[in-house]
Amino acid sequence: MENEKDKTAFMQSPLLVTKATGTGDAVLLVIYPTGASMGRRFALDTDEKFIGRMEDLDIPLEGEGLSRKHARLFRDVTGWQIEDLGSTNGVYINDVKITRRHLKDGDLLRFGVAICKFLSGDNIEAAYHEEIYRMSIMDGLTGVHNKRYFLEFLERELAASTRQGTPLSLVMVDIDHFKKINDTHGHLAGDAALKEMCARLKPRIRKTDLLARYGGEEFAVVMPATDLPAALQFAEVLRALVEEEPFSYDVIKIPCTISLGLAQVDPVNPGKPDDLIERADAKLYEAKRSGRNRAIG
């Protein structure tokens, strides 16, 4: 769904404000959580680096679940390795909990809620700029598109729908009682629930559709060339996918459901993207008020 012209324009624009610095042969790039630290780049230019929430460490990170001195990165003759320093919430590589592990280019490292990407090899600069661009359109936690990209995509598809006279539907999705998950099991479990929900939904999304994180626990699916009855059938499939099996976080099983609100573009008065979002959101809140775990359009 990415547009090469958009990508080229982004690379040449002042939006790319993070400057390249000396990298040695590897870097660690912060991709989550969003905020001032996202996009921060740490050059692995010595043979040992310590990671944690202490400000005086080589790689100080932010976010819930970080230990003061969480992990150690070190380089030997075999390459870079990472070691958990007895942290409370562990170190994960590509969502697998580890004690010590060799790192490969492109590995995703998670420390509490913080997620970093390990980049190494001969093309670090190209990989770094590619990742910075990807971060501008993708949500670092769930791996689906972010709100910025969603709004741009919806605007384009609304214009195409109006021009061609084809239907367009929008599905807004919200995890039921998400605050209760966070309050009961902690924000790490909440993040795990968001990731698992997207992992279940993504295989069902058509290539012409878009799944995006709208904000918090709310997601959106844009469905070009799809009328409301067909979108409602699709929404029921998504609802059942989430309900049929609890989410997993370590040894914890978290039963979960979703509510969905749907709206179709009015062919007579298509309006603006915000109008469609507002109508779908109104249906989502109706589904919440009606008992949750349902789709209303």
Image (cartoon, rainbow, N blue to C red):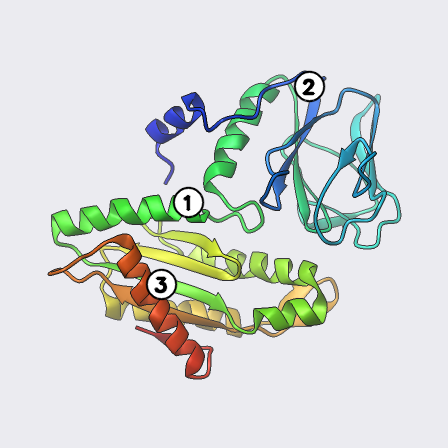
Q: Where is residue 148 in the image (x, y as percent from the top left)?
A: 41, 44
Tag 3, which secondary structure?
strand
> Label 2 amino acid?
Thr
**At 28% across and 66% down in the image, what residue appears?**
263
Left or right side of 14 for 55: right
Would you name the residue on which mark 3 appears? Answer: 171
Left or right side of 64 for 195: left
Residue 141 appears in view: yes
> Label 1 amino acid?
Arg
Residue 124 vs residue 102, the one in the foreground? 124
Q: Where is residue 18 in the image (x, y as percent from the top left)?
A: 56, 26
Quarter of the image for residue 1 reads top left
Q: Where is residue 218 in the image (x, y as percent from the top left)?
A: 47, 61
Residue 294 appears in view: no
- Extreme residue toward the bottom, this view: 291
Neighbour tally class for label 1: few under 14, some 14-19, many 20 plus, Cα within 10 Å: some
Q: Distance between the residues labelled 3 and 1?
A: 17 Å
Would you name the residue on which mark 1 appears? Answer: 148
Would you name the residue on which mark 2 appears? Answer: 23
**At 80% across and 51% down in the image, what residue appears?**
90
- Extreme residue toward the right, this view: 86
Label located before the other in sequence (3 or 2): 2
Quarter of the image for residue 170 reads bottom left
* Numbered disc in front, either 3 or 1: 1
Label located before the other in sequence (3 or 1): 1
Label located before the other in sequence (1 or 2): 2
Decide: is 234 above or below 143: below
Label placed on residue 123: none
Q: Where is residue 294 in the image (x, y as percent from the top left)?
A: 42, 77
**At 58% across and 69% down in the image, what residue appears?**
178
Left or right side of 171 for 34: right
